Amino acid sequence: MRFINTIMNFPFKRIEIYKIYVPVLLVIYLLSGCSKDNDRPDLEQYTSYVNHELVLTYSSLGIKEIYQTLEAFYPEIAALTALVQYNVEVYNVTYKTMFQGEEIEASGLVCVPVSDGGNFPMISFQNGTNTAHANAPTKDLSNILFIYLHATSSTGCIMLIPDYIGFGKSEQIVHPYLHKESTVLSVENLIVAASEMMAADLINANWDDNLYLMGYSQGGWATLCTHRDISENSSLSFDVTASACGAGPYDLSVVQSFMFENITYPQPVYLAYSGVSYHELGLITNPLSDYFNEPFATELPSCFYGQFTNGEINEMLNDTVAVLISGSFLNGINTDSKYQGFRDAISNNSVHGWNSSEPIRLYHGTTDNYIPSSTSEQVYQEFIASGAENIVTYIPQPDLNHQTAVIPMALDALLWFMEMNQN
């Protein structure tokens, strides 16, 4: 449940209490350690896998204790607690993927139930917006929110958490934020790498071929992008069983308009991140001063080299839209020819509904003031218009915002996946 990683500013007040006693639980129940990279006698047999390292182990008893403590705040988690039965091993996996036409190495976590080679479904979780290298899934192992997500494997599933390009093994690259192609490949190739690890008996678990995708915010967008690509990509050897997408910026033009329509926007880091990312990728070639006022235009690139968190970057910027964003951009975003590259970039990196044959649940808090619920409503209508009205479900989350909708969405999605996998 960081469950929802850097999930765009999780409601920390509700879990502050855990900082008092979770470290004690971890001392008792959680053994962490590192091992050398596994021997790789013949890397040519692998399409994606490069190496892996055991970084954490959990006991089922410790996981149950942690879940039971969380039940005081989220009673619905009791259904997950009842399913806890396995110890868990967490691996940092290095794998190959493509970025701008070149093969690179990326990283992510593969969490597996400790069993005698049992068959389990696979869940790939895509995290929300993160700017700090130290907060990547493979680096931030002791973060309590990630611990909840690792622990889910104890219920009998293989949990994957990609770092995304720009973090972990590939942190020398500026993260290609909201860049569809590289995001999708980073998710898909970790799935391939995990399947290759199991096929080669590098980890003692087997995949039952059921693949579930889930994510929130940027991760909701990444999940829907990946689901659509897998459904249309005949070169892959697996299909999606179902996916759950929370509060994703699916149509980037809708989100952009929402960000600009008010005097202030509470997360200026999002405004800056996409501009810097698309400029770094070469999708926009005019100077950043065409988009941002000074001194921000000059200083922005240095904000996204991985040393600052979302909150720290917000402090460096300004939440008054007209102070941060160039007036010419605000006035000409939809018409001025010099912004055509930006219009193309957000169009090409948006994701729209299709006639899906696999179940999808879309979640969105009705009071979200970071990502408008209208983007989920729009993509849902696109699914209906494409003929998927009986397979795709939109679940509005009344009176919940971008922060408070996270955990309810994740719990509902996980229980839904488990119910499907039992049928």
Image (spheres, helix red, strand yellow):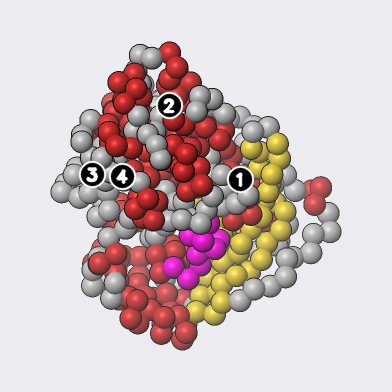
As drawn, is 210 to the left or to the right of 369?
right
Residue 203 image point, x, y percent: 66, 64
Task: Give the dominant element type of the magenta stretch: helix, strand or loop.
Answer: loop
Q: Which mark is residue 318?
A: 4
- Identified by mark 2, the residue type is Asp
Residue 419 image point, x, y percent: 37, 54
CA gap between label 2 and label 4 equals 17 Å
SS at circle 1: loop
- Identified by mark 1, the residue type is Ile
SS at circle 4: loop
- Identified by mark 4, the residue type is Asn
Q: Residues within 10 Å of mark 4 (few under 14, many from 20)?
A: some
SS at circle 2: helix
Of badges 3 and 2, the one in the foreground is 2
Of badges 1 and 3, the one in the foreground is 1
Disc 3 marks which residue?
A: 368
Disc 1 marks which residue?
A: 173
Q: Is residue 363 visible?
A: no
CA gap between label 2 and label 1 equals 24 Å
Q: Is residue 313 visible?
A: yes
Identify which residue is drawn at 31% across, 26% down: 327
Residue 336 highlighted magenta (yes or no): no
CA gap between label 1 and label 4 equals 26 Å
Segment tinted magenta in the rendering: 133-143
